[in-house]
Structures are given as C-alpha cells and as structure tokens.
Amino acid sequence: MNNENDNQIIEHDEITGQSTCQSASSEADDSSPIQEHEEEETVNGRSVRRRGVYLLPNLLTTGALFSGFYAILSAMAGNFEAAAIAIFVAMVFDGLDGRVARLTNTQSAFGVQYDSLSDMVSFGVAPAVVSFSWALHSLGKVGWAMAFIYISCAALRLARFNTQVGSVDSRFFIGLASPAAAALVAGMVWAGHDAEPGVTLSIVAAVTTAMAGILMVLNVRYISFKGVDLRGRVPFVRMLIAIMVIIIVTVNPPVVLLVLGAAYALSGPIQVLLRKMRKK
C-alpha cells in the first residue's frame, strides 16, 4: 500500500514562517520546478523548499562584498590607505557571517555560494588590484603577471575549499586561506602607502603578492581557529593575552597587522620544515 505522505513536498516561507504541504508523484517530471527564489533542502527525509534568503548572515556577506568593491574603487583613485583598510573591514564581515549563521541556525546552500563569490571579490580581486595600482604597475607586464598569479591562486583556493567542505579536518586549512592572504597584501600596502615609489618597493610588492597567492594553493596545513568557542569559558591568562594583542594592534595597526599576517603566512611552511627536520 502506497503512503502519499512519503512523497510530500513541504514549502516553507522564511518571511511568514508558514509551511504548506503538497503531494508529489514518484515520477520526477510531475514535480514542479524549483523557482529562482526557492532553495530545496532535505529535512527529516522530506524535501523542503524554502522561499527567500536569511537576512542577517547574507547582509554581513554583502557588507564584505561592498568593502572589497570599495577597496577597488579607492585603489583606482589612488587612496591606498583607505583601500587597505577596506580589505580588513571585509575580513571582519567575513568572519562574522559564518558564525552568525551557525549561532542563529540560518546556514543555507545559497549563503555558502554567496560567501564564496564575495570572498573572490574581496580577497581575490581587490588585493591584486590594490597591489597593482600601488606598486606593481611600474613593473609593466611583470607587475600584472604577479597580480594575476594572486587572483588565479585565490580562485583555485576557493574552488578547492568548496569541494573539500565536510571531507577535511575543520581544525586546519589546506593552503593559506584567502582572507589571510589578503591581510598580508593589504597590510603591506597599508604600512607602506606613503613610501617613496621605486624599483625596490615594486619588487617587494611583486614578491609578497605572488608569495601570498602561491601559499594559497600549496598543500600546507594552517590552523583554522574554528575550534575556538566564543561562548565557552577560557582561562584568565588567555583573556589577558587577547587584551594585550588588541592594545598592541591599536598602537600601530598597519605594521602590527602586517607582522601578524606575515607570521601566520609563514607558519605553514615553517611547520613543514620542522617536521622534516624531526624525521631526520
């Protein structure tokens, strides 16, 4: 005996919170197509079509996207300090959207894809454009080649991350995360935005930009810090360390952020070298 309830499709409206249930035939061509404003999920063995998108996490993602866009505009206008700061602001938004989605149980496939596209603009295109407009342009074809190396590596890094979700240890990243690579480039530009242009500056920018890109695609592990529980209790010493770090950053933000970004970027290769030395 067939049970019609096994073939029901539940439609849920995210705005009103109301759900409607409709019967679906076992034949695939009898079911109505998914509309542009709908997203299909599986809940308790049933197909659920959710209408609309979650506002708060996607609004934060939009903030990150706008910050990356603003960084590009600022670089084109020659305001490199504002461009670098905008990339760091994008990092703040990017760090918040995922956590807010998990805390409020508003994760969605749409949010994952939107976040990835936002990352490509804010941490892929924007840092390369900022670095090129700041110093790489004086190197001609070599300059835009270094910028393209960064962009292409960022795209490869994000594509690999999307295909590895759920299949790798969440405590680690494989390759330097795109926000960390962007922090390295943005920190360099912010710290040297008022430096005198010259061959030396252009070479430093080229090496740093290309290195940040290559580190994103290397098969090297980096600590992800995703295991940090912001809601749990922590030792008092850790709280003091966090406060000291904040104070140090406020003393000279561009230099301190550049040092922190460089230290994190180099931590992966250094760990690999240390492991090889121990084996010997």
Image (cartoon, grey):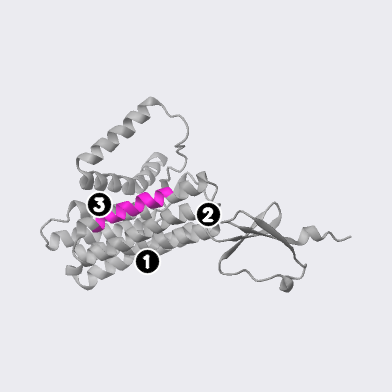
Query: Between disc 2 and disc 1, whose residue precedes?
Result: 1
Give the residue displayed 20% in from the left and 69% down from the top. Answer: 137
| Displayed quadrant of residue 19 | bottom right
Position of residue 58 in the picture relative to residue 135 (left or right):
right
Q: Is residue 273 above or below residue 17?
A: above
- Tell me the distance, in whole angstroms, between the alpha carbons under discs 2 and 1: 20 Å
Residue 274 visible in the displayed image:
yes
Give the amino acid at mark 2: Val
Q: Which residue occupies the extreme front position in the image?
A: 16
Give the amino acid at mark 1: Ser
Give the residue displayed 59% in from the left and 64% down from the top. Answer: 38
Q: Which residue occupies the extreme right position in the image?
A: 1
Residue 83 rendering spot, x and y as whole percentages? 25, 58
User: Which image quarter holds the N terminus?
Assistant: bottom right
Element under disc 1: helix
Magenta region, residue range: 83-96
Give the residue displayed 23% in from the left and 64% down from the top. Answer: 75
From the image, tell me which residue sits under label 1.
152
- Tell me the distance, in whole angstroms, between the alpha carbons under discs 3 and 2: 29 Å
Residue 265 rendering spot, x and y as whole percentages? 33, 49
Mark 1 and mark 3 in contact? Answer it, CB < 8 Å.
no
Element under disc 3: helix
Query: Between disc 1 and disc 3, whose residue precedes?
Result: 1
Mark 2 and mark 1 in contact? Answer it, CB < 8 Å.
no
| Displayed quadrant of residue 115 | bottom left
Mark 2 is surrounded, within 10 Å at the Cα level, by few (under 14), some (14 to 19) or many (20 or more) other residues, namely: few
Position of residue 66 in the picture relative to residue 79 (left or right):
right
From the image, tell me which residue sits under label 2.
165
From the image, tell me which residue sits under label 3.
187
Query: Between disc 3 and disc 2, whose residue precedes?
Result: 2
- Tell me the distance, in whole angstroms, between the alpha carbons under discs 1 and 3: 20 Å
